[in-house]
Amino acid sequence: MKRGYRLLYFIPLLLILYLLLDQYVFYTKAVFPPATVFSGKSIYNPYAQLDTSDAVVANFHAHAKAWGGLTNGKGSAQDIWRRYDSMGYAFHGVSQYFNIDTFNHRAINYVPVYEHGINLRKTHQLVMGATSVAWKDFIFPQTLDNKQFIINKIAEDPHALIVLNHPNMLNGYQVDEMKKLYNYDLIEILNPQAQSLPHWDAALSSGRAVFGIANDDVHNVLKNSLISRFYTIVYGSASEAEGLYNALKLGSHISVWAPKVAADDLAAKKRKIESAKKLLLSVKVLNETVHIQFSKAIDTIQLIGNNGKCLRMERMKNAISYQFTPSDTYMRVEFVIEDGSRFYMNPFFRY
Ligand SMILES: [Zn+2]
């Protein structure tokens, strides 16, 4: 009997030992492409096929009640659809941990999505378009090799669009690591828990062509104040999942940070979203010059370049042009409108 009890102690200890060895001793070493910079005479325009008549809004990160209430999430997948629908969203991902929710899976705007990651530092990924869940994870604080290994594991599914979630949360991804990581598509630059612009600039300054995305990461969709704070405006998706994946791969979208207005009900939020969708009029690249036109004068426009450096700031302009200098490898645009909403455009970069 006593021996039986002792064995009971040993089983969890052995399991922890196995996990530690698997993660820190017998791990796969990653081979990283060299850190480089964007170079070439051409400038990539993520908005080259901009169709301003087809601007829709999306949220891909929302948790409902799941796993018998074990994970943090209130409301149902149906609530997530209903609430975001009433604000006019075209896409609303239900991102349970390690589970692809199938509510409304026959709808053309259904996006299969799940959040990958069960580990102490919250090194999480949002996986869109996948056909099945990749289960492998490392639960202790992950090394750079561990992080790349997991990304590569998820990327074995050729349909998976991979987002590095809230990098700045608990240092899930360090800024320096972003200079090396690859094989993913997007960075969740805006999330209520963590804004990760330095991470994005580190990746871009190392020649990683990755785009930004903004999500509510809501765990209680029934609370007005928690929804529509962070969203993504997508152009040219035709409100279909396939069109969405194409747009996200091109970078034909903008990340938005809306201010917290306690009095706003869903109708008020919808009105603000509708006007945000109309802000961008045209984005052209001619030779090495980027031209952007807005539908009205914008309070503040900031151009950001290599390593997050501010290249220029303008106030109350409804258009802006910027000619790349020989040392500019990329340039991205942030702008703020009068109600405090902030917009983060995807980067223009040399190729
Ligand atoms: Zn997460």
Image: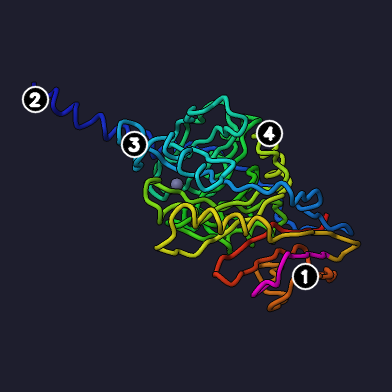
Is 291 contained in the magenta span?
Answer: yes
Question: Quick one: label 1 or label 3, which is nearer the N terminus?
Answer: 3
Amino acid under disc 1: Ala
Label at residue 237: none
Rounded to the nearest whole Å, what is the CA distance between mark 4 and mark 2?
Answer: 60 Å
Nearer-the-camera pick, 213 or 262: 262
Q: Is residue 24 visible?
A: no
Question: Would you say the residues marked 4 and 3 are in contact, meaning their CB atoms lie under 8 Å apart?
Answer: no
Residue occupying the far top of the picture: 1
At mark 3, the secondary structure is helix
Magenta span: helix, strand or loop, mainly?
Answer: strand
Question: Would you say the residues marked 2 and 3 are in contact, meaning their CB atoms lie under 8 Å apart?
Answer: no
Q: Which residues are magenta?
A: 290-301
Position above or below: 26 against 53: above
Badge 3 is on which residue? 17
Badge 4 is on which residue? 242
Nearer-the-camera pick, 26 or 346: 346
Question: Quick one: label 4 or label 3, which is nearer the N terminus?
Answer: 3
Ligand 1 within 8 Å of the CB at mark 4? no
Badge 1 is on which residue? 319
Q: Callout 2 environment at 10 Å: few (<14), some (14 to 19), or many (20+)?
A: few
Q: Is residue 39 left or right of residue 67?
A: right
